[in-house]
Image (spheres, helix red, strand yellow):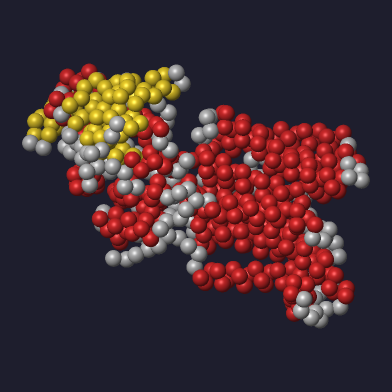
């Protein structure tokens, strides 16, 4: 008799992934206005981490350690979070078009940021991430309580519809505020499109703990996400506490997304593109999809950031524009194939 | 000895009574089949027992109340096979059968070697070994039913609820699936409650029939006592002839002249 085991990532895929991560991180740090050879990059990183001798000059050292590495790592961490949150939402809602902003995170963060930009002068820099974070979580909370009370918490469609309603309400309020203060629109617009330019290690240090915890929680639910594939009713009769599991997944995905959005603004499409490209390659099991989304979400955003920095150098394109330029056509492709039922 | 006792089961949806005051006793290895016209509440009754829709009344297993149990513990007692089980595209038969072990795993745990072994055992028992790598979404109707039953068996619950297990199947697959259920309930001492559409078929394997109309049990007992022209005329509004055959009553609709 033939035997089979549960789905897991093959050793070859692990090796390829490790190489992909190392190569993209190295490229991310070495490519830029001043091009730096990979060896210099690694010797500088090694000297900072382990105190080994570095062959880089003082300015090279600053570029690597203070400018590029924190930015590249931020891109990686945020990409991982957005892709894994999108992946988890797609699983628990059985909806191939679900993304991390499904339940109103983006509209909430946008409103929070808008309010902070309007009211802030000197303190705005400090308040902006907090306001965006609070707005994002507030929106998800609103969506969740509305969706649950609509149909006793059983229907995930009610939750998605509540998300649509909450998002349009908050976006309308944001638009209203903008129309009253047209002088700040430019600043808001820049925020909405997302950016990765950071002030050293600070942003990364603030959001990484949140994101790390959220990603670990989502990873723990990878088998549960496969159970969700048979639908709420059958999953329940198989012993899955459907409402409880979905709530935990939503909390982890939303909290992590809110933390990412707070620092980088709204970077679209990562949460849809990455899991779906992976689906086409490795199939639909979340035991494989979720870990790989974490890895390749990071890789994708680092690559997108390299493009954003180099295409029109020395000018920088918003990272959100790059991901959307790649993402929108892909989104249409997913729409087309999910109509044939091949992506779900 | 496992015995399912249901007393005064009531399902209400939008202030309408869908299932009304139902009592059933099912013993180990027994097969009780629920029949009745469309909209009589057959599927709702099964879904209430499975915990999918809310209900009131007692559901006791060996005297203890199922309502006090967590989703997981309940699933260890009662497995459910939907009328059209969802077959997720891209999922292998093996992974699908393995889902049946969910009830025996902590929520965040992954399967142990023992769980894999049980899935393999069920698969070989149901002659599905050649299918383990097939995508469940590409299976035919009969194969889907067998794979869904395999998943329920991997769940290892002493009670299995089957909603119209043969409705979508041609006569060959129908026979195959019903023979399988009949063999399993006898060998593994599983209590089976199923709904069924085809009256003649419903008289073939189950020990007892329950005729449901407008949410209430109107007649219950052996196939011979339930499948009478009078009962069918009254509750289905159909004019039929019933012929006694050695394997059970044969119900033939009469043509209007």
Is B133 positioned to the left or the right of A321 in the image?
Answer: left
Locate the N terminus of chain B and report the quarter of the image it occupies.
Answer: top left
Is B224 positioned to the left or the right of B188 in the image?
Answer: left
Is B105 positioned to the left or the right of B221 in the image?
Answer: right
Is B186 positioned to the left or the right of B193 in the image?
Answer: left
* Residue nearer the viewer, A68 or B58: B58
- Give the total number of marks visible in the rendering: 0
Where A284 sits versus A49, above or below? Answer: above
Picture quadrant where residue B54 is located: top left
Q: Going 24% across and 29% down the picture, which residue do you hit?
A: B25
Q: Going 77% across and 62% down the picture, which residue do you hit?
A: A71
Q: Going 66% across and 46% down the picture, which residue do you hit?
A: A255
Where A72 sits versus A228, above or below? Answer: below
Q: Where is residue B212 in the image (x, y as percent from the top left)?
A: 27, 24
Q: Where is residue B93 in the image (x, y as percent from the top left)?
A: 37, 55
Q: Going 16% across and 30% down the picture, which residue do you hit?
A: B223
Picture quadrant where residue A33 is located: bottom right
Q: Where is residue B241 in the image (x, y as percent from the top left)?
A: 14, 26
């Amino acid at each position: 008799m033939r035997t089979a085991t549960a789905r897991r990532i093959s050793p070859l895929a692990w090796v390829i992934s490790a190489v992909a991560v190392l190569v993209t991180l190295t490229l991310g740090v070495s490519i830029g206005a001043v091009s730096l050879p990979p060896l210099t990059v690694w010797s500088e990183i090694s000297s900072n981490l382990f105190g080994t001798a570095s062959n880089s000059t003082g300015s090279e050292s600053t570029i690597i350690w203070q400018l590029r590495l924190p930015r590249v790592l931020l891109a990686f961490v945020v990409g991982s979070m957005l892709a894994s949150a999108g992946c988890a939402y797609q699983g628990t809602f059985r909806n191939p078009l679900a993304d991390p902003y499904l339940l109103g995170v983006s509209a909430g963060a946008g409103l929070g940021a808008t309010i902070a930009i309007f009211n802030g002068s000197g303190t705005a820099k400090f308040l902006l991430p907090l306001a965006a974070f609070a707005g994002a979580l507030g929106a998800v909370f609103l969506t969740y309580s509305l969706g649950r009370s609509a149909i006793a918490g059983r229907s995930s469609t009610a939750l998605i519809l509540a998300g649509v309603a909450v998002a349009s309400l908050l976006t309308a309020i944001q638009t209203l505020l903008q129309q009253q203060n047209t002088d700040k629109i430019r600043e808001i617009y820049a925020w909405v499109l997302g950016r990765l330019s950071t002030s050293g290690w600070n942003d990364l240090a603030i959001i990484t703990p949140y994101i790390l915890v959220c990603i670990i929680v989502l990873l723990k639910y990878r088998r549960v996400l496969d159970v969700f594939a048979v639908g709420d009713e059958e999953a329940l009769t198989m012993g899955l506490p459907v409402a409880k599991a979905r709530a935990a997944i939503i909390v982890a995905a939303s909290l992590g997304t809110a933390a990412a959005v707070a620092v980088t603004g709204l970077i679209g499409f990562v949460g849809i593109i990455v899991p779906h490209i992976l689906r086409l390659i490795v199939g639909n099991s979340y035991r494989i999809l979720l870990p790989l989304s974490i890895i390749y979400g990071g890789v994708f955003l680092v690559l997108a950031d390299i493009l954003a920095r180099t295409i029109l150098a020395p000018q920088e394109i918003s990272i959100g524009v790059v991901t959307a330029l790649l993402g929108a056509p892909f989104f249409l492709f997913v729409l087309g194939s999910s109509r044939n039922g091949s992506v779900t | 000895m496992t015995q399912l006792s249901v007393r005064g089961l009531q399902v209400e949806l939008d202030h309408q009574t869908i299932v009304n005051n139902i009592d059933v006793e099912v013993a180990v290895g027994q097969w009780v089949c629920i029949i009745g016209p469309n909209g009589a509440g057959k599927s709702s009754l099964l879904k209430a027992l499975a915990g999918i829709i809310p209900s009131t009344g007692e559901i006791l297993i060996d005297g203890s109340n199922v309502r006090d149990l967590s989703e997981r513990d309940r699933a260890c007692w009662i497995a459910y096979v939907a009328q059209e089980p969802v077959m997720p595209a891209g999922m292998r038969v093996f992974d699908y059968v393995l889902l049946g072990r969910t009830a025996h795993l902590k929520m965040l745990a992954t399967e142990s070697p023992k769980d894999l072994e049980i899935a393999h055992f069920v698969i070989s028992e149901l002659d599905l070994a050649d299918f383990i790598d097939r995508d469940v979404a590409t299976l035919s109707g009969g194969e889907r039913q067998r794979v869904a039953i395999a998943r329920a068996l991997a769940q290892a619950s002493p009670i299995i609820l089957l909603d119209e297990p043969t409705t979508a199947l041609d006569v060959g697959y129908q026979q195959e699936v019903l023979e399988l259920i009949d063999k399993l309930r006898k060998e593994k001492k599983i209590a089976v409650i199923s709904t069924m559409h085809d009256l003649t078929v419903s008289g073939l394997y189950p020990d007892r029939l329950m005729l449901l109309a407008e949410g209430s049990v109107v007649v219950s007992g052996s196939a011979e006592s339930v499948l009478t022209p009078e009962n069918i005329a009254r509750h289905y509004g159909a004019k039929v002839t019933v012929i006694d055959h050695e394997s059970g009553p044969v119900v033939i609709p009469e043509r209007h002249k």
